[in-house]
Image: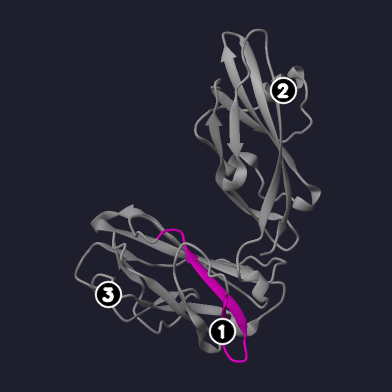
Amino acid sequence: MNPSSNNTVNVSRSYFNMLGSASALACALMLSACQGGGSVNGQVDLIDMRSEELLSSDLASVNGTYGAGCTNRSGAWSLEIEVGATLDNDPLSVVLNNDACVLTMTELHTIDGALAAVPAVVLTTSYNVIPSAFDDPVAFYGNAKMSSVSFASDFVLTVLYSDDPSLATDDNTATFEVIQASAMGDSVAAPDYLIDIDGINAVTDADQVVVSATGSVALTAGLVSGQTYVVVDASGLDTYAELDAAYLAGSPAAVGASVPAADFTLVGEDLDALPKRTLIIANIEGAVASYQAFEITFHPATVL
């Protein structure tokens, strides 16, 4: 389609492969920062983490349909994955801020042709509880989700597929264990925070090695607030001297409402080894500091 409106989200592509041990594949469509003409442009990232060669599932493109609420759009769309792939339909584009537009993934085009998703995948911000089957007999299972359905800014479309349906339902998500401590310096009160670690999403491969960590740890201040925090790769910090030394060796950041997952430097960690991180929050008055510490243990992921 070639709509006349210049408020469009257009899709371009780039490609890379990464072979790992998990029998799953994810491809992400990420739209970049807004450029001139009221539109944003993007790329396709293909991340291959299959444990074996599934020739019939080598992706060339994604096919789908526009819903009735899509402004100036109707019928089918396609999205290139393989360089130079011939698309079955016009490239995917969505009018900016058209939050009534519902996209559906109907097919994945492989070297064996277009394989229908049964059932078709209505794209929301969550994976479907049950993955869709592709081809008959089944060649593989697939699922998909979007980071946002508002189309107000950049968004990510993630397509996950596997020869094992249990690996096409959701990510391998790690669990956590927290131990809390505090240490006071002279007459300065220790910070008094509650934390919520449910906002961290650590995703692993089949060997329990973290491949991505997103989200954040939420902080809720009590009667005593802190000013800065550090996250250290250490555990068992029980005394004031240990906490003080660890804090001073770190790179303090201003305390806000949350601590981003990136601060925990989890990517590449083997969760079978139960890695630990300690979040230290400081309340500093003059030259005296008091600390509150949360030791967080990251447990192996459970495949959902």
Q: Residue at x 36, y 72 (%)?
A: 92
- In the rendering, at what x and y percent does residue 11 appear? 38, 67
**Structural crowding at the residue carrying mark 3, measured as other residues with C-alpha within 10 Å and reported as few (<14), some (14–19) or many (≥20):** many
Q: Which residue lies furthest to the left in this view?
A: 4
Question: Gap in Å between the C-alphas at discs 2 and 3?
Answer: 59 Å
- Residue 108 seen anywhere in this rendered image of the structure: no
On residue 134, which mark appears? 1
Q: In which quarter of the image is the C terminus?
A: bottom right
> What amino acid is at disc 3?
Arg
Q: How many marks?
A: 3
Question: Gap in Å between the C-alphas at discs 1 and 3?
Answer: 26 Å
Which element carries disc 2, helix, strand or loop?
helix
Which element carries disc 3, helix, strand or loop?
loop
**Structural crowding at the residue carrying mark 1, measured as other residues with C-alpha within 10 Å and reported as few (<14), some (14–19) or many (≥20):** many
> What amino acid is at disc 1?
Phe
- 38 relative to 145, above or below: above
- In the rendering, at what x and y percent does residue 273 appear? 80, 48
Which element carries disc 1, helix, strand or loop?
strand
Res. 229 image quadrant:
top right
Answer left or right for 106 relative to 241.
Answer: left
Q: Which residue is drawn at 71% across and 60% down?
A: 302
- Residue 286 seen anywhere in this rendered image of the structure: yes
Q: Which residue is drawn at 36% across and 75% down?
A: 91
| Mark 2, residue position | 243
The magenta-colored residue range is 131-148
Upstream in the sequence, badge 2 or badge 3?
3
Answer left or right for 303 relative to 141.
Answer: right
